[in-house]
Amino acid sequence: MMKTMQPYHPYHILQLQKFKQSFKHHSNNQWPGQIPVLVFVCNRPEAIYNHLKKLLRYRPSTEKFPIIVSQDCDDSSVKEVIDKFGAEIIYVRHLNSWSAHFTIIPEHKRYITYYRIARHYKLGLSYVFDKLNYSSVIITEDDLDIAPDFFEYFSATRSLLDADKTLYCISAWNDNGKDYLIDKKQPELLYRSDFFSGLGWMMTRELWNELGPIWPNGFWDDWIRNNTIRKNRACIRPEISRTGMTIEGKKGASRGLFFTQHLAKILLNEIFVNFTKLNLRYLLKENYDHTFLQRVYSAPLISSVEMLTKEVITPASSVVRVQYTTLENYLQIADQLKIMRDFKDGVPRTAYLGVITCFINGLRIYIAPDWNIWSGYNSNWEAPSE
């Protein structure tokens, strides 16, 4: 059972009417419809205050980007913070997960938080799609920071999800987006990725209609990465992340797992890119794959990890390729370059068609499988614990 406020305050009804009048005036590749932002919260009042302040600071249009805050616990201090924003925010509170009855197998009792999160996501997404009838949604959580062009990025890429059914999400996050692994001179650079990264992402109602009825009881993010669900579809992700992790992320469900060594080090973009003025059709599969693979496999091949180390220190060219054939081989390269080394259902983080890329000391590096023998991801590939 879900307790909700009315979908719109009178203020929002007025703004919606104004926005519908403006549909015919859109230009370029800006999405003409509304894209709500759904923010998941529980019990961190300072986090939601900072997150909402940043969303409102960068939001270009109240009408186009309604902000919906979804809370699944009875933390009154969080509600007090949200109430201060008044009509700027649509607020919905669900029956808290501590009062809800759901079954967890005994060996997963210690993971109960992940079951509560999965339940909350299902309730929040159902509210946006099934009750408010939106066609898409941008999903955030209260511990995220956002870039100045956060809304511009999602508005420009939304049409790709309709134009290309081999895409199933747009993500604002680069798992290998640390300062020393990216090209900071190319904030406009976007990629296709077989790895779902989340942490600020957009999905459509069409995808919800597919996934909602089979939504898992727990660990929803690993579930959506499984290829039985992903079905060889990809996401769009940026070179430089459009979301960042705040210190509040250290208090999250993973209790700081990855936070100090990874999440906190992902660089947040600071340069506004006018994505809606750019032609992003190069990201469609029919345009992307051939060009991408040609670029990767025409790059000079580095024969060993030792040679790669020398090339990174004193680059002799602007781009190189290093090849992997086994799990051990891949992990050796990943550890040498200090990129993320783990897999989900056999897919390395940020990979597309088996290729992972990073940018170190002015050198573009492609970590690529041997295309002559590669037959797809191996779901048995798992990185041992460090």
Image (cartoon, helix red, strand yellow):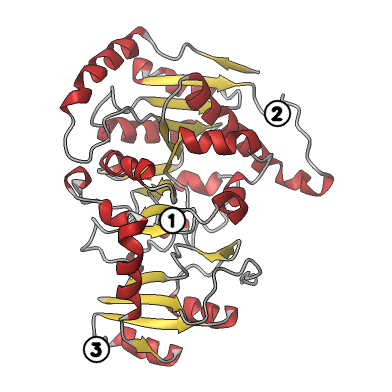
Quadrant position of the C terminus in the picture: bottom right
Tag 1 and tag 2, C-beta contact below 8 Å = no
Amino acid type, residue under disc 1 in the picture: Ala
Residue 37's image quarter? top left
Compare residues 25 and 57 and report the one nearer the observer.
25
State which mark lies toward you, 3 or 2.
3
| Residue where numbered disc 2 is placed | 98
Q: Is residue 360 visible?
A: no
Q: Check disc 3: other Cα within 10 Å, few if <14, some if 14-19, many if 20+.
A: few
Compare residues 91 and 257 and report the one nearer the observer.
91
**Cα–Cα gap, marks 3 and 2:** 59 Å
Q: Is residue 121 above or below residue 386?
A: above
Residue drawn at (67%, 42%), measured in percent from left and top?
218
- In the rendered image, residue 373, in percent from the top left (x then y), is placed at 52, 81
- In the rendered image, residue 200, in percent from the top left (x then y), is placed at 42, 44
Residue drawn at (56%, 68%), measured in percent from left and top?
377
Amino acid type, residue under disc 3 in the picture: Ala
| Residue where numbered disc 3 is placed | 316
Name the mark on residue 264. Answer: 1
Q: Is residue 133 above or below residue 313?
A: above
Q: Is residue 53 visible?
A: yes
- In the rendered image, residue 72, in percent from the top left (x then y), is placed at 59, 27
Amino acid type, residue under disc 2 in the picture: Trp
Compare residues 272 and 224 and report the one nearer the observer.
224
Residue drawn at (21%, 43%), measured in percent from left and top?
276
